[in-house]
Amino acid sequence: MKNKRQEAIVRLVSEQPVETQEALCELLMREGFAVTQATVSRDIRQLALIKVQEGGRVRYSVPALKKEVMSESGGLIFKMISESVRSVDYAMNTVVVKCNAGMAQAICAKLDSTELHNVVGTIAGDDTIFILMRTERDAERLVRELGNIIGAEA
């Protein structure tokens, strides 16, 4: 049931502007899901949904680094990240991605191509990527997303 509900959440926020958890609860109930705000809040966290500004309003959105989105591009980005990223962490609004030797620039280029939300810029060395995010909350979200891909507890 959880997977179906979370699939519905991704579909709903992708198809229409959903501004609040209450609005998302109502939409889910119309689709036959018995949910509480606490359940929806937990789902939003687990799905790593983000809030984006659109026309002066804020709405929920699916981040660019979702497994489904990356698998649509042949799975190359997902495969590179899952096989070559060793760890991910953040300090303030900077995300630090540790990779296998020689892989950081290739992974950084692939991440840049996904047009990640609220990224100011990236820089890569041989085995380390620095990603400057707009806020600490954005950095925490990206660490959680990357951690999910590499199987780390974020």
Image (cartoon, helix red, strand yellow):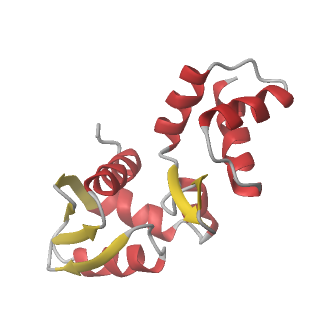
The quarter of the picture where residue 73 lies is: bottom right
Dividing the picture into quadrants, the one containing residue 4 is top right
The residue lying toward the viewer, choosing from 88 and 45, is 45
Is residue 23 or residue 99 the one in the foreground? 23
Q: Position of residue 43 (x, y in %)?
A: 55, 32
Compared across the picture, whether 69 is left or right of 110 comes to right
In this rendered view, identify the residue nearer to me: 121 or 27. Answer: 27
Residue at point 41%, 77% (across, down): 110
**Residue at the image position 53 percent from the left and 30 percent from the top:** 41
Compared with 32, 83 (above or below) is below
Position of 106 compared to 110: left or right? left
Regarding residue 61, the answer to whether it shows in the image is: no
Vertical position of residue 24 compared to residue 87: above or below: above
Which residue appears at 73% of the width and 49% of the height? 11
Residue 61 pos. (x, y %):
59, 55
Farthest residue to the front: give it. Answer: 56
Quarter of the rendering occupied by the N terminus:
top right
Query: Which quadrant is the C terminus positioned in?
Result: top left
Please indicate, yes or no, whether residue 19 appears anywhere in the rendered image.
yes
Q: Is residue 98 left or right of residue 122?
A: left
Q: Residue 104: where, in percent of width, then height?
A: 23, 74
User: Would you say 57 lies left or right of 17 here?
Assistant: left
**In the figure, residue 35 lies in which quadrant?**
top right
Count up the numbered dots. 0
Q: Which is nearer the eye, 154 or 55?
A: 55
Residue at the spot x=29%, y=79% of the render?
Answer: 121
Residue 27 rendering spot, x and y as whole percentages: 78, 35
